[in-house]
Image: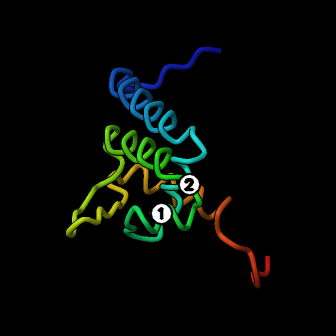
Amino acid sequence: MNVVAEGLDLSAMHASATEACKLLKALANPDRLLLLCQMTQGELCVRELEQLLNIKQPTLSQQLTVLREEQLVHTRRVGKQIFYSIASKQAMAVMQVLYEQFCKSDTGAAE
């Protein structure tokens, strides 16, 4: 059975689906996913990200560049340090769910 809802804006839905695919493609890399997962907890500098995630500098720079190009992160410079935070509200919403499901420690939690 083929049901078409009245007032459905297929053009807008297509554009939204395209944006969702773009976000999911950016998230489909373990290093970028780890970086964004850490950033759900707040702004971090490159040195902190490198230490927390044990991602070597060349890989870290490459993945942060991808996140900047996709406009998923903001940067803020203080002297020689660059701080990163999540810029996209959609990315933050997705990452918060992923953080709760996959990153958050269940230590001491009762279900």
* Residue type (three-letter) at the residue carrying disc 1: Leu
- At 79% from the left and 81% from the top, the residue drawn is 110
Residue 34 is situated, as x and y percent measured from the top left of the image, at 56, 54
Do callouts 2 and 1 mark residues in contact (Cβ within 8 Å)?
A: yes
Residue 82 placement: quadrant = bottom left
Q: Earlier in the sequence, mark 2 or mark 1?
A: 1
- Drawn side of residue 33 relative to residue 18, left or right: right
**Relative image position of residue 42 (x, y in whole percent):** 41, 70
Distance from the alpha carbon under mark 2 to that under mark 1: 8 Å
Residue 19 seen in the current view: yes
Q: Is residue 100 left or right of residue 93?
A: right
- Is 74 located above or below residue 1 in the figure? below
Q: Position of residue 19 (x, y in %)?
A: 39, 32
Q: Which residue is at a point 28% across and 55% down the rendered structure image?
A: 74
Q: Report the disc number at residue 32.
A: none
Residue 45 in picture, x, y percent from top left: 37, 66
Label at residue 55 = 2
Toward the viewer: 4 or 104?
104
Is residue 7 visible from the viewing direction of this image? no
